[in-house]
Amino acid sequence: MTTFAIVHGAGDVGWSWHLVSALLEAKGHTVIAPDLPTEDESKDLTDWASTVVAALPSTSDVVVVGHSFGGLVAPLVAAQVNASALVFVTAMLPKPGEAPGDWWAQAGYADSGLEDQFWHDVPPDLAAESRKRERGMSENAMVKPWPLDALPDVPTHFILCTEDRFFTPEFMRRVVADRLSGVAPVELAAGHCAQLSKPQELANLLAGFAN
């Protein structure tokens, strides 16, 4: 069966994906969702990707999933393991040479101004636990240019969350059209943390991208 390599978002941890992981494993898949060294100023996106690759039990038939900021890291993983698929989940899409810290302005991001942009549709107990696990982000990783010349040439998918208050659907549709030519987003009625609010629906979509 397929191995899913999940790259969590900024300030997050692999725990956020425990519900989706259990559902995928119940379908017979293997899932790894390691905590990335996001607070270590000596490490950058390439090191974060290496952390994911090192956690893989095998590099055969790997679907790499990048959530939010993890969208900048997931392609680096996919390129290293010749992934069978690359899936972005309401994620930042990189451009060659663009520093993560510059992404916001260059992608045309504007704050929605809405309250509770991350957990508004997440069950309160899970939202509280997620908040407790928040971590910092390395400034060093924000200034180094994205290292690849292009996205890896593998089957690529984008899951767009239609109730996302952080990366609103209108904004994400523009970004996908600009940076992921030829890929039609798959829409999921969920907020930014779909892995906690709609784990079954998200797991079903991910399983559909497995070989």
Image (cartoon, grey):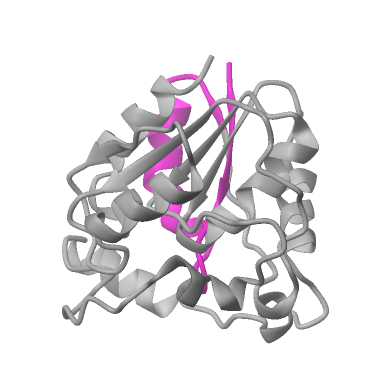
Residue located at (29% from left, 74% from top)? 128
Residue 119 percent coordinates (x, y): 24, 68
Residue 115 percent coordinates (x, y): 17, 80
Image quadrant where one finds the N terminus:
top right
Position of 82 relative to 104 (above/below): above
Residue located at (69% from left, 37% from top)? 152
Residue 6 part of the magenta-drawn span? yes
Q: Quadrant of residue 168?
A: bottom left
Question: Number of labelled discs?
Answer: 0
Residues 135 and 180: in front is 180
Which residue is farthest right?
Answer: 42
Residue 112 part of the magenta-drawn span? no
Position of 58 relative to 37 (above/below): above
Q: Quadrant of residue 23?
A: top left
Residue located at (25% from left, 39% from top)? 187
Residue located at (65% from left, 73% from top)? 38
Residue 82 percent coordinates (x, y): 74, 29
Image quadrant where one finds the C terminus:
top right
Residues 69 and 52: in front is 69
> Magenta residues, as a range?
1-30
Residue 191 percent coordinates (x, y): 23, 57
Is residue 78 shown left or right of residue 158? right
Position of 71 relative to 60 (above/below): below
